[in-house]
Image: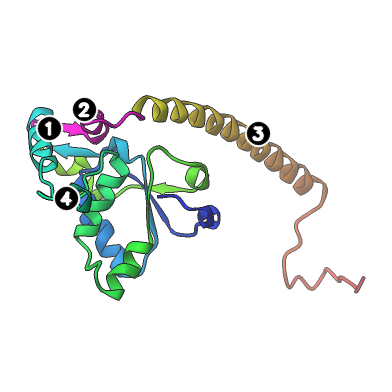
Amino acid sequence: MVKPKDRKWRGIVVDGKNHLMGRLAAVVAKQLLRGESICVVRCEDINISQSFMRNKFRLKNIMRKRHLTQPKRGPFHYRSPRKMFEKVVRSMLPYRTAHGTAAFERLRVAEGIPQPFAKKKRCICPAAHRILRLAPNRKFCRLGDLCTDIGWRHDKTIKDLEGKRKKLAELRWKKKKELTKLRRAAERLVDRIIPRIEYGDPKIKIGSL
């Protein structure tokens, strides 16, 4: 979950698109225990191996489990992709100890790419990427589609927000390219007008201002 204090985030931002959920969770959990702060974005585009129907039946079988006399006591089954991935990572941490609790506090998960992380440089995890780790003939499904089938309602909203974010990012990139081009042209102009002064040249004497 993204918190207000994350506006000055200085950790690692991982793009979860086309990553296998279990493998990515294992890598993230190990890095959290080592002291890293990690945010996983685009959780709705995380992949799960095996077909959609197989995963659907397995998930519905898990969601039937409840407390017999008082279901409000748990277990609690989440329907959003970010909460599902967060629970998988938590199961790989010793979250009942002080060390595990501190590691879990350093984790952030989000659907789409919210504003605190939109301008950050994102990375991928080769050890968990589907294209690198799953055989081409193996079946897989998208976590967002699986969550939509069991009651998550925000997939279309996230896609619309992602489209707007990509348009803004494209405009920002074009503006940055224009500024870089103008800066390089100015540097070339200055180099032609003012000769370069090499450090330690005895012929050049620079007095104090």
What is the C-alpha distance between the residues marked 3 and 2? 45 Å
Residue to which mark 1 is pinned: 56
Residue to which mark 3 is pinned: 178
User: Crowding at label 4, few (<14), some or many (≥20) Cα neighbours within 10 Å?
Assistant: few
Q: Residue at x 24, y 69 (%)?
A: 96
- Observer-side mark, 3 or 4, equals 4
Looking at the image, is 92 positioned above or below residue 181?
below
Q: Position of residue 63 (x, y in %)?
A: 14, 41
Q: Nearer the viewer, residue 52 or 192?
A: 52
Label located before the other in sequence (1 or 3) = 1
Looking at the image, is 6 positioned above or below residue 44?
below
Residue to which mark 4 is pinned: 70
Direction front: furthest residue: 69
Q: Position of residue 44 (x, y in %)?
A: 31, 36
Image marks 3 and 4: residues in contact by CB distance under 8 Å: no
Within the image, what quadrant is residue 135 found in? Answer: top left
Amino acid type assigned to the residue bearing label 1 in the image: Lys
Label located before the other in sequence (3 or 2) = 2
What is the C-alpha distance between the residues marked 3 and 4? 62 Å
What is the C-alpha distance between the residues marked 1 and 2? 8 Å
What is the C-alpha distance between the residues marked 1 and 4? 26 Å
- Observer-side mark, 3 or 2, equals 2
Look at the image and say whether residue 145 sits in the magenta stretch.
yes
Q: Position of residue 123 (x, y in %)?
A: 37, 48
Q: Residue at x 12, y 38 (%)?
A: 59
Looking at the image, is 197 positioned above or below residue 116?
below
Residue to which mark 2 is pinned: 149
Amino acid type assigned to the residue bearing label 2 in the image: Asp
Label 2: element kind: helix
Q: Which residues are magenta?
A: 136-154
Label located before the other in sequence (3 or 4) = 4
